[in-house]
Amino acid sequence: MKFTIETNFKLLNFVRFLGSTKLYQDNSFNVEKSSFTSNASLFYDKLSNLGGRSIRTGIVDYVPYGTTEFVGANRGNVDAMNSTLSKELHTEGFEGTLIVEFCKFYKCNLKVWPFGPDNWGYINDAENGEGMLFSPLSKKTEIIISSIYYQWVYQFLDYSSPIAYSSILILVPRAKPLPTVLTPLYPFNPSLWLTIFISLIVMTVVHYGISTLNLFGSPIPRFEKSIFDMISIYLDQAIIHNKSSLSYQILISSVLLSGVVLSNSYSGGLASVLTVPRYGKSLETIHDFAQSPYRWGVPAIAWVLAIFDAESVDFKTVVKKFDVIPDEEKLYRRTLAGDFGVGIELLNSQKITVGPYIREDNVHLFELPKEMLYYSYTTVAAQRGWPVMEQLNNFILMANQHGLVLHWERRTLRKNQSTRMEVALDPTISRRQKDEVVQALTVEHIFGPMFILLVGAAFATGIFVLEFMWHAYNDNLKWKQDPIK
């Protein structure tokens, strides 16, 4: 029988007619209206109800993305793999909650393999590896979650739609107070000191030349007098000058004018240095950190896998400076010296999350650079051709559109990161030094000038001893040559 377009439309209208009747009666059966509704789907989504299908999931314990905890049978929200007990695990974190709610929505059974803290693992080019990243490729799990954003494993696994934005930063050692022994040098920067030194040399040479050529019969002064005359003017000290030469007077006037300006500028700068501490240069960029002598580290190598093959010289240097310290207590003690950086993460909600190795007593040792190390979007990684990926992508999109991802993320942060810790992090994030109290001068403030005085006195004493020995030697030599005199 040949069906035309007109015949098809007639059949469709007949079906709609049957659906509009309240009851279709026949000698053999009854058909209610609900069996033939006008909005019935002719292509039913068989995956909208998975009927309790088990989904093997790997999770790394990493706050606030995902955590798992053994709580006992029927006390958790997910099953454990390789266990016959029901609901033995409790899964939290905003990505862990996402997968739990996904299985509730699609009526599947989540079986979790807890990989523990920081055990992301790896996959090499020979398709070998270990840890959570390797588990979908080895068919031990179907999907894996908890801050997965490694683009270099796209060739081995399928990735879902992005879940959340994440950026990696380095908490660098905070700028240290400059040593007080160099206090007299702090009012001027090195380039200004160099300029003053060169000007002092030039003025000394000009002063000696004018004094030598314009004395009108006066004795020629020694070069040392020109040196000390110029130093005396710059230190606001009086000198005995020659008034008979106009060129000499013009030179001394210009030197006096510049000396007054410099001495007053130095006095104002020195006053601020003595009362308000000075700090070294802060590390604001990745280049600054790469050029610094500091190293950094976290408990897992996964933090640098994304930039391991970067061509940037700075990134290569940062990777070389990276240390893996799995023991969190050891990492905490390593940071107490104030010369070691740690990795942190800026979350989708623009909140900072730190590991347990950052505490209230060492957070003040760090500051946040202005430049991030790198950023990416976290996803769910799955076996190639995983059949439920489309449904998972739709659920991720729906959860983000309704703000559920942000809500779950903030809820996890409130549970795992105290308000006191957030307050302690505020100066670090804002790159603000602790409040300094302007105080009266103490011995510590004048330690630099006193150090110069002590060094000068010791140096003068040493020179005096050498001079005394030299004169004694010359006197002894002359007496041997002419004992009568």
Image (cartoon, rainbow, N blue to C red):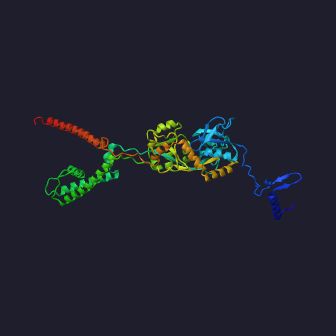
* Location of residue 207 in the rendering, given as x and y in whole percent from the top left corner: 22, 55
Residue 43 lies, with reference to residue 434, above or below; the image says: below
Work out whether residue 112 or residue 253 is closer to the camera in this orientation and state it. Answer: 112
Tell me the quarter of the image containing the C terminus: top left
| Quadrant assignment for the N terminus | bottom right
Answer yes or no: is residue 383 visible.
no
In the orientation shown, which residue stands out farthest toward the right?
Answer: 27
Of residues 185 and 191, the one nearer the viewer is: 185
The total number of labels drawn is 0
Coordinates of residue 138 in the picture (x, y in percent): 67, 41
User: Which residue is nearer to you in this view: 415 or 225?
Assistant: 415
Whether residue 379 sits left or right of residue 256 in the image: it is right
Query: In this view of the protein, can residue 14 be seen by the observer?
Result: yes
The residue under the point 19% across, 58% down is 249
Q: Position of residue 441 (x, y in %)?
A: 30, 44
**Left or right: 472 with respect to 199?**
left
Q: Residue furthest front?
A: 22
* Residue 381 horizontal/vertical position (percent): 64, 46
Pick out the residue farthest to the left. 484
